Amino acid sequence: MRPAPLDERTFVKLKITIDGKIYQAEVEILDEEESAHAPAEYPPMPLAAAPIAPVVSGNMNACLSPVMGLVIKVNVKPGQKVAANEVVMVLEAMKMETHIAAPRAGIVKSVPVAAGNSVKLNQVLVELE
């Protein structure tokens, strides 16, 4: 649907709800010549890399879940060598990713969870030999 000729300014009233609050906005429709002089669009800023979760306990033989969440990616399997601070798993909690890192270098003994599993706070995610 094309807007009416712009002999007079054409405005559209919008009602926007953000976090349960209702806002009203009045938006001016620009013709092609006016929109050519509109401010340039800028690409979105890249998001910072997801932080690597710190070791929750003094247990250097296991990676524990720092949050209740969902396992979205498992990067290791039993028998695999890992380096200290290597990301072994990615969890999602409240739409945020948390990277789980190995507390030390070693060999993976077991991975008792899989992608798609829900995990509890301080649940063992990866055991090291």
Image (cartoon, rainbow, N blue to C red):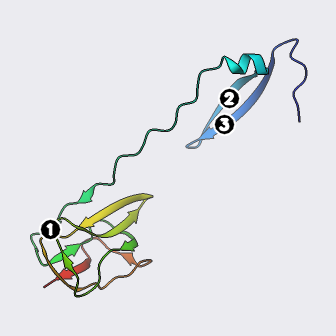
Crowd rating for badge 1 (residues with CA inside 10 Å; few <14, some 14–19, many 20+): few
Number of the label disc, if any, that sits on residue 84? 1
Residue at point 86%, 16% (across, down): 6
Crowd rating for badge 3 (residues with CA inside 10 Å; few <14, some 14–19, many 20+): few
**Residue on which the image places disc 3:** 16
Q: Nearer the viewer, mark 3 or mark 1?
A: 1
Give the image location of residue 72, x and y in percent.
Answer: 42, 71
| Marks 1 and 2, how far apart at CA | 53 Å
Give the image location of residue 62, x and y in percent.
Answer: 17, 77
Q: Is residue 128 left or right of residue 30?
A: left
- Local secondary structure at mark 3: strand
**Residue on which the image places disc 2:** 24
Say which quarter of the image contains residue 101.
bottom left
Tell whether label 1 touches label 3 (CB within 8 Å). Answer: no
Q: Is residue 109 visible?
A: yes
Sequence-earlier tag: 1 or 2: 2
| Marks 2 and 3, how far apart at CA | 6 Å
Residue at point 30%, 63% (across, down): 99
Q: Is residue 66 visible?
A: no
- Local secondary structure at mark 2: strand
Tell whether label 3 touches label 2 (CB within 8 Å). Answer: yes
Give the image location of residue 84, x and y in percent.
Answer: 14, 68
Crowd rating for badge 2 (residues with CA inside 10 Å; few <14, some 14–19, many 20+): few
